[in-house]
Amino acid sequence: MQQTSSFIRSFVRREGRFTKAQREALQLHWAHYGIEPGQEELNLDKLFIKKQPVVLDIGFGNGEALIALAKQHPELNFLGVEVYQPGIGNLLRNTFAAKLENIRVINTDVVELLNNSIATNSFAAVLIWFADPWPKKRHHKRRLIQVPFLQLLAEKLVVKGELNIATDWQNYAEHIQETVKQSGLFEELPSSTFIQQRPQTKFERRGEKLGHKVSDQVYIKKTN
């Protein structure tokens, strides 16, 4: 287990605009879809109606991609982790409207969650799509993808579990490739074995307008 205090937070809590609909959805639907981690490890099978492989979605933003994934893959359960409550409210509203039962949500720092509440060999796959690239050099230490974090993910992934990453910042894409290689814990795959097609996100569309090229990277946990 990694010490949480050894990690530099990769996010800054800026809630932004909280719409009435988002706030109402949070109040109405959190009790059903939301998970409050306690002192003991979570039993992931008991969080969902169906017992099936669980995919961890780290930083799902407004939830549009997670909703699309849950619709595409009813054979998978999705645990979304997000620190920003407006995004959670948006996800809950749309999850309820779509009557999806293969989504559950946690509002916390993913490092704390993995360290304190998740057993080893828990996730079939982990998704990290368009995390904050922290483009300024002095902020690179805040980037989520660092060797200690990859070690933590590898511990929580099943054997041959998948790590699926997308970014539209070339410098961050290169950083990810170098860091994954440095960790020695994963090998790269040509495409995902889980996700048929990655849904486009708001951040991806914004990046395209700015002329950014998207880098999709898929890795599998090594067996030794």
Image: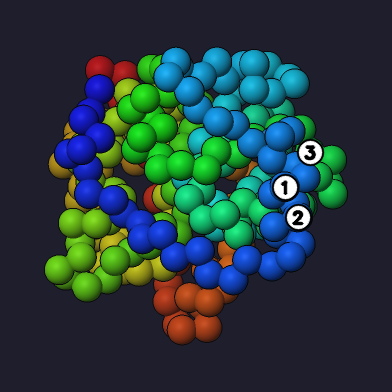
Amino acid on which disc 2 is placed: Glu
Q: Earlier in the sequence, mark 3 or mark 1?
A: 1
The residue sitting at 51% across, 36% down in the picture is 56
Q: Which of marks 3 and 2 is nearer the N terminus?
A: 2
Q: Is residue 47 above or below residue 192?
A: above
The residue sitting at 15% across, 68% down in the picture is 138
- Give percent across and percent down for residue 76: 66, 30
The residue sitting at 28% across, 51% down in the picture is 9
Q: Is residue 57 above or below residue 3?
A: below
Q: Which mark is residue 208?
A: none
Q: Residue 27 carries which label?
A: 1
Quarter of the figure that contains the C terminus: top left
Q: Marks 3/1: CA distance?
A: 18 Å
Residue assigned mark 3: 100
Please tell me in which quadrant of the rendered image residue 49 appears. Answer: top right
Circle 1: is it few (<14), some (14-19), or many (20+) Cα within 10 Å? few
Residue assigned mark 2: 24
